[in-house]
Image (spheres, grey):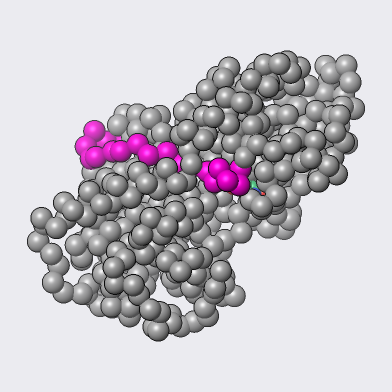
Amino acid sequence: MQTYPHPFPISRVKIPSRQPIALISEHGDPAAQIGKDAAGGQNVYVRQVGEALAKLGWQVDMFTRKSNPDDATIVEHTPHCRTIRLVAGPETYIPRDRLFEYMPAFVAAFQKFQQQEGVIYPLAHTNYWMSGWVGLELQKHQNIQLLHTYHSLGAIKYRTVDHIPEIAQTRLAVERQILEQSHCVVSTSPQEMDDLRHLVSQRGRIEIIPCGTDIDNFQPISKTAARQQLGINSQGKIVLYVGRFDPRKGIETLVRAYAQLVERSADPGNLRLLIIGGSDPQADDGAERLRIEGIVNSLGIGASIKFVGMVGHDRLPLYYTAADVCVIPSHYEPFGLVAIEAMACGTPVVASAVGGLKFTVVPEETGLLVPAKDEAGFAEAIERILTDDLWAQQVREQAVARVQDNFSWTGVAAQLSDLYRSLLARSILQPPMLRMAPAPTSFRPQIARVS
Ligand code: UDP
């Protein structure tokens, strides 16, 4: 991986035969360390899709907001896939709910980059509603095919949180505009498509293309070998959580369910819960981690719970394989990459029956689904998997097959690539833009309002 400091290097040699495309992900930096602060599934999705599309022959530029002055402006992941960090607002981490005001600056920075590089991207695949807004603004100034992946829908998310942020109305309105005005929305599950149709708009094109996983990295290996490498007792039963520390992830539900398991287990010393993800307590996600630690202590179960911290994809397969069950207790989960990563390693999943998890996890075949927040239900489902070895073995095999058949990044990228090609072919029939996008200084975007 090669990185470049400021300013943008203009000497980069472009291969003319490659079609340049832009993936836009304003807060999910594809080059970021995953598992820390707000970095999670969106970062992984954009990076993996970008790299897989580059392998299929595209020139992929992935745009994100620069959130740290020490970060390189350009990170070259492979010769035809790079992350470009645009300056839009202070170069510091800004929570998503306060980021929208910097999106006009993001649009301006994107346009400036196009001018400097002498390129106009004919297609942008935007991620999350704020990048979708950026795409809609670009559409006003250049001939661009616009695809969008939501990653999270305000209409669902706001049902699951106690505090509705000020930005909510704007977000809901923009999410509707994106569906109605972009060329295609890429929904990652049939559930998301239903939600879009019922809660967002009846208009607009939707194609279902799921998220994927790297099946060469996440694959079944020997459980004994994995535990040996991690220095874990080979006899015990291991329950695993992997993900960000965010109240919507439902870690509290898991911890309380685990306490019930410990309570009724004949051999509680044999049980262990590993919680992976998050950074140190001072970081942005530290408040949720401290809250969860407080619950663990008040339940008196701290001795068998380990907060492992952030683990990279290089070592995560060891943890998934070492575990007997991976639990995803989210209150809302648009897709849930962790589910397919665990299943790809042959680990049964117990997940909330919400969003994309209802699509990826097949009850009784690759794991079990439980109503969100149902602590007793989670305890029961986890116990079933831990105590029925024969069935758990069948689940392992079926889980691996399900991921390999449906959720490889290569397969996902091939579907996206076909869609991009069909949209670009159609755009040739539309009148081309003959001039560059207007200078950023003259750009005056409108902030969407709820009608
Ligand atoms: N992840 C990771 N290390 C960690 C915690 C999480 O690499 O310590 C990754 C995890 O493997 C997955 C992503 O972060 O690829 C989380 O994606 P998911 O869709 O499950 O949740 P999101 O973060 O989008 O809510």
Q: Magenta stretch: residue 214 in it?
A: yes
Q: Left of 162 or right of it: where is 181?
A: left
Foreground of the two, 84 or 226 = 226
Q: From what the image shows, is residue 276 above or below residue 11?
A: above
Foreground of the two, 394 or 194 = 394
The location of residue 358, given as percent across then percent down, is 49, 26
Q: Left of 419 or right of it: where is 337?
A: right
Q: Left of 103 or right of it: where is 265?
A: right
Q: From what the image shows, is residue 354 above or below residue 419?
A: above
Query: Who's the residue at 62% across and 40% down the image?
Result: 219
Query: Who's the residue at 90% across and 27% down the image?
Result: 269
Magenta range is: 200-218
Query: Who's the residue at 22% across and 50% down the image?
Result: 423
Labels in figure, total: 0
Query: Who's the residue at 9% across and 61% down the image?
Result: 431
Q: Quadrant of the C terminus?
A: top left
Q: Magenta stretch: residue 185 in it?
A: no
The location of residue 245, given as percent across then percent down, is 65, 45
Q: Quadrant of the N terminus?
A: bottom right
Quadrant of residue 284 in the image? bottom right
Foreground of the two, 448 or 212 = 212
Quadrant of residue 37 in the image? bottom right
Q: Left of 255 or right of it: where is 186?
A: left
Please name the predominant secondary structure of the magenta segment in the image.
Answer: loop
Q: From what the image shows, is residue 62 above or below residue 345?
A: below
The location of residue 390, given as percent across then percent down, is 71, 16
**Residue 89 appears anywhere in the view:** no
The location of residue 355, given as percent across then percent down, is 47, 31
**Residue 386 appears anywhere in the view:** yes
